Amino acid sequence: MNHQECSLCGGKTRIIHHTRIADFHYCTNCEYIYKDERFHVSMEDALKIYNNHNNSIEDPRYVEFFYKFLYDAVFPYVNEGKEGFDFGSGPSPVLAQILERDHGYEMDIYDLFYAPDKVYQGKRYDLVTTTEVVEHLKDPITVFRFLKDLLKADGTLAVMTLFHKNDEEYFKNWHYIRDLSHISFYTVKTLQFIADQTGLEMIHTDGTRYATFQLKNK
């Protein structure tokens, strides 16, 4: 397979060949790693994978998983408003339920499979969240731009995904690539590039899993 231009920034890529899973392209410029399209699963197979995610607000470990995100990447940075939107809410919209039940938010949700109504049309939000979603995106720039356009002038976008470590051997053994519906992998540098392209400013990251954005020059 020939090396190709990065689908995100146009930089030079090299191939990471995984004998059991797929070929991936690693960009030496923006550090984006993406799965070669020949290895993408079908929509039907992706749905089967998502249906195996048995998560519930009744599961205290799963709730705690979200609270770590909220206390690190959300609550320190949000405005006083309580209108929120969760993009890619999954089969059970636990994050939206937590924010409504315990923190007074009025949440809209959207999910390609489980909540496909475009309830966000014509609206702007104080808070937009997307958790464990961007690793599924074929075209992250377009989606980040869409999410940016849903923010109020002082709104906050909070993202959760697991960052790769810029280590090819680690990557090949990384549990995150074993989910075959995961096709895009980022570092802080990758997300900074996306922010620069979409009119966002990264105001926080823990360097591992969370990144928080607001409108640039808001």
Image: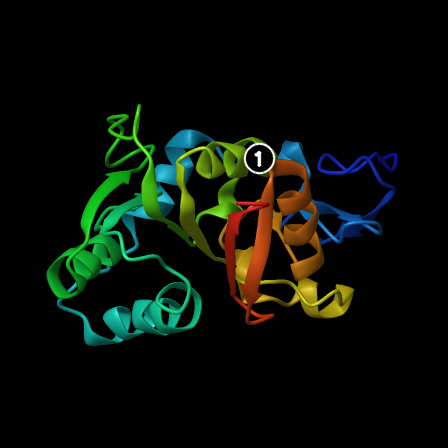
Residue 154 location in percent, x, y? 42, 48
Label 1 environment density (alpha carbons within 10 Å; few <14, some 14–19, many ≥20)? some
Residue with the mark numbered 1 = 138
Residue 218 location in percent, x, y? 52, 45
Residue drawn where x is 87% and y is 38% of the image: 3
Looking at the image, residue 3 sits to the left or right of residue 61; the answer is: right
Q: Total label count?
A: 1
Q: Quadrant of residue 71?
A: bottom left
Residue drawn where x is 39% and y is 68% of the image: 69
Looking at the image, residue 216 sits to the left or right of residue 75; the answer is: right
Q: Is residue 56 visible?
A: no
Q: Is residue 205 above or below residue 60?
A: above
**Residue in front for this viewpoint, 179 or 196:** 196
Question: How is the protein colored in the picture?
Answer: rainbow
Residue 66 location in percent, x, y? 32, 67
**Outermost residue, front side:** 218
Looking at the image, residue 61 sits to the left or right of residue 213; the answer is: left
Residue drawn where x is 24% and y is 26% of the image: 117
Q: Amino acid at mark 1?
A: Lys
Looking at the image, residue 66 sits to the left or right of residue 101; the answer is: right
Q: Is residue 168 visible?
A: yes
Residue drawn where x is 18% and y is 63% of the image: 103
